[in-house]
Amino acid sequence: MYALVDCNNFYASCERLFQPWMNGKPVVVLSNNDGCVIARSNEAKAIGIEMGALPFMIEDLLAKHQVEVRSSNYVLYGDMSSRVMATLDLFSPNVEHYSIDESFLDLHDLIGVDLFDHGVNLRATVHQHTGIPVSVGIASTKTLAKAANKRAKKTSAGVFVIPDEQTRIEVLSSMDVGDIWGVGHRNAYKLRYWGIHTALDFANAPRSMIRGKLTVVGSRLQDELNGTPCADLELEAPPKQEICTSRSFGKMMTDYDDLEEATLNFTARCALKLRKQRSAANVITVFAYTNRFREDLAQYNGTRSITLPVASNDTAELCHYARIALKSIFRPGYRYKKTGCIVQNLVPERNVQSALFDVGDRDKKRKVMEVMDLVNRKYGRDRMRVGAQGYGKRWHLRCEQRSRAYTTRLSELLEVNVDQ
DNA sequence: TCTGGGGTCCTAGGACCC
DNA sequence: TCTGGGGTCCTAGGACCC
């Protein structure tokens, strides 16, 4: 059996931990740039705030219900996530950390233990260690555990087990086909058109039909819903095959120099992420977009890829090629909203194929990066940087309601008054 | 004024090989 | 009447996830 443990309204729950007066009140967390709603407490859901809602369009609703609005604070969420995960690791030797707020646990070694009680215990322990509420779904495949978890969220215990065939059929028959993990809105639409409305319809549909219309992906899903596991736990995250850093800007930008400074900062982030996983990139892609929602403005999407002579994770070298790419796509006169950098065709750092006519001392460059990373680990991100990254930060994000780094910054620790 | 950021997997079709 | 049979590699695009 597998358990799927999912943190309830994770970002909103993190915000509440250190601002407990928000308990029982509606809370929403906004995306980068305070652009749209990406997390909601149950109270916020209840008053009808939708995922993706735009704050300026629901101003009245927010004011009327005195909704607590927060900018996203990923440092806090990332730290709370690792605390939750560390607790889950106590419950199974095999845990897949699937996303920032979800983990799969392998329960195959659990013999003679009541699974429901185990789930209740797990939930209580996570709450005791971290204060984060979680839901637990337990079943014989990952896809069924997902379905059980969805059901668990509707129960007061917060735990739901699919122990037998009867329960499986009952759960699947009351589940919309679009709620199956792996069926997105596009395939859900098609499936309904073909007369498949519930997860049980999907599980019982002719195999050849599912295979024909939804390829092997659909076929596997069907097997999983019928209790045949097709996906094992991924205990170690495989190295990423590509890495992207991009942001929308608080304000649209027209000036090339501003755009370059932002883009090279994103490139530097990519280079750092590459070094962290000990990879080097063969290809670098840079893109620059205008605001696609502003139909009144001229639109432009520029993108350019460059193949490096030798795979690299050197910040200065990647910035050099990123700048060439950006210069070649930049068109004056447009108002740019977003740029980004993607590094691709990654290879292990130790495995880099050198070029016949390569110039420069790569060993020396590597040592420079090592020192830079060391300095920055000790004194803070980007303390040491390439000049082109600048200090202007004209491209900075808007985040007007950001909470403190309660768990990761000494200067922002919570103060507790003990006089009373 | 105002719409996130970061990934993976699969398939079809073209180019090319013998 | 009417033009083989297998392959591989690469890319673009679609679909999905959080």
Image: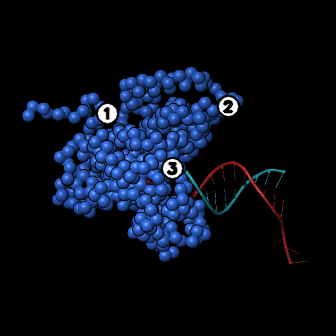
Chain colours: A blue, B cyan, C red
For mark 1, give the secondary structure. Answer: loop
Q: Chain of mark 3?
A: A
**Viewer-nearest of discs 1 and 3:** 1
Mark 2 and mark 1: Cα distance apart in space: 43 Å
Disc 1 crowd rating (10 Å Cα; few below 14, some 14-19, many 20+) is: few
**Viewer-nearest of discs 2 and 3:** 2
Q: Depth check: A315 or A240 in front?
A: A240
Mark 1 and mark 3: Cα distance apart in space: 38 Å
Q: Is residue A248 left or right of residue A282?
A: left
Q: Is residue A260 visible?
A: no
Q: Label 2: which residue?
A: A355
In the displayed structure, would residue A288 be above or below residue A377? below
Q: Position of residue A113 (x, y in %)?
A: 40, 49
For mark 3, give the secondary structure. Answer: strand
For mark 2, give the secondary structure. Answer: loop
Evaluate whether label 1 is on the same chain as label 3: yes
Q: Label 1: which residue?
A: A408
Evaluate whether label 2 is on the same chain as label 1: yes
Which numbered disc covers residue A302? Answer: 3
